């Protein structure tokens, strides 16, 4: 085999890997978005992997969110949706015009976090809505005032491990710096 053929193959493989890193996340996100519009779940196209107790998990988290809504009122209490995987990470909130916001939470969080760590994540996401901010450190502080900064730090470390591999690899230094900044803000 000629060296030029080997180089051609390596070049083709590098282009494929590049395309996966660049276009893969947006393609997956588009599939989630389309699935949500059609069936009401961000990952319903993988519905056959859902455990039987998914509804009870959503109800459990919804009760915690409803308590937050009574303690820290906002115009519309968010609906809770549990999902298995997302390019956006283990938990996030989506605000929708003239509709209830949705708090998305990865099922793996329910499986691996203790109740207080789970509350820290839910409080953080709710904090974005209550404080009307995208600032992660402000949402962290909101959560730490309810459950304590130690539990927020533990939850942050666990959620970092749940970030999709494709993002964790491609944005590792950014994510590491972001986590350090968040830990430091909690210490202040």
Image (cartoon, helix red, strand yellow):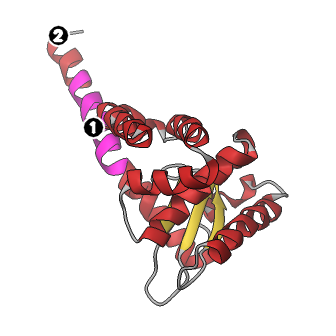
Pointer 2 or 1: first along the chain = 2
Q: Which residue lies furthest to the bottom in this view?
A: 98
Task: Tell me if 10 is positioned left or right of 153 in this view.
Answer: left
Residue 54 image point, x, y percent: 78, 60
Picture residue at 44% right of the left edge, 42% below the top: 186
Q: Which residue lies furthest to the left in this view?
A: 4
Say if 119 sits above or below 34 in the image.
Answer: above
Residues tagged 2 and 1 counted as in contact (Cβ below 8 A): no
Label 2 – label 1 distance at C-alpha: 22 Å
Say if 179 sits above or below 142 in the image.
Answer: above
Q: Nearer the viewer, residue 113 or 37?
A: 113
From the image, tell me which residue sits under label 2: 3
Say if 110 sits above or below 173 in the image.
Answer: below
Circle 1 residues within 10 Å: few <14, some 14–19, many ≥20: few
Tell me, yes or no, whether the highlighted magenta stretch contains residue 12: yes
Residue 96 image point, x, y percent: 46, 80
Q: Which mark is residue 74?
A: none
Dominant secondary structure, magenta: helix
From the image, tell me which residue sits under label 1: 18
Q: Which of 59 and 14 is in front in this view?
A: 59
Q: What element carries label 2?
A: helix
Picture residue at 58% right of the left edge, 73% below the top: 72
Task: Tell me if 156 is positioned left or right of 77 in this view.
Answer: left
The quadrant where residue 162 appears: top right
In the image, the segment drawn in magenta is: 10-24
Residue mark closest to the camera, 2 vs 1? 1
Tell me, yes or no, whether the highlighted magenta stretch contains residue 13: yes
Residue 133 image point, x, y percent: 37, 66
Q: Is mark 1 on a helix, strand or loop?
A: helix
The quadrant where residue 135 appears: bottom left
Residue 176 image point, x, y percent: 36, 32
């Amino acid at each position: 085999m000629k060296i030029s053929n080997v180089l051609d193959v390596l070049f083709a493989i590098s282009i494929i890997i590049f395309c996966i890193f660049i276009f893969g996340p947006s393609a997956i996100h588009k599939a989630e978005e389309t699935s949500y519009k059609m069936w009401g779940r961000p990952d319903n196209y993988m519905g056959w992997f859902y455990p039987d107790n998914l509804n009870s998990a959503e109800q459990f988290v919804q009760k915690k969110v409803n308590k937050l809504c009574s303690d820290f009122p906002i115009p519309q209490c968010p609906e809770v949706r549990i999902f298995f995987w997302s390019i956006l990470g283990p938990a996030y909130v989506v605000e929708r015009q003239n509709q209830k916001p949705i708090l998305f939470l990865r099922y793996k969080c329910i499986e691996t976090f203790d109740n207080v760590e789970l509350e820290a994540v839910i409080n953080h996401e709710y904090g974005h809505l209550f404080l009307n901010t995208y600032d992660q450190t402000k949402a962290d502080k909101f959560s730490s005032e309810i459950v304590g900064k130690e539990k927020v730090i533990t939850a942050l470390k666990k959620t970092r491990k749940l970030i999709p591999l494709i993002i964790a690899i491609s944005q590792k230094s950014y994510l590491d710096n972001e986590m350090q900044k968040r830990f430091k803000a909690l210490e202040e």
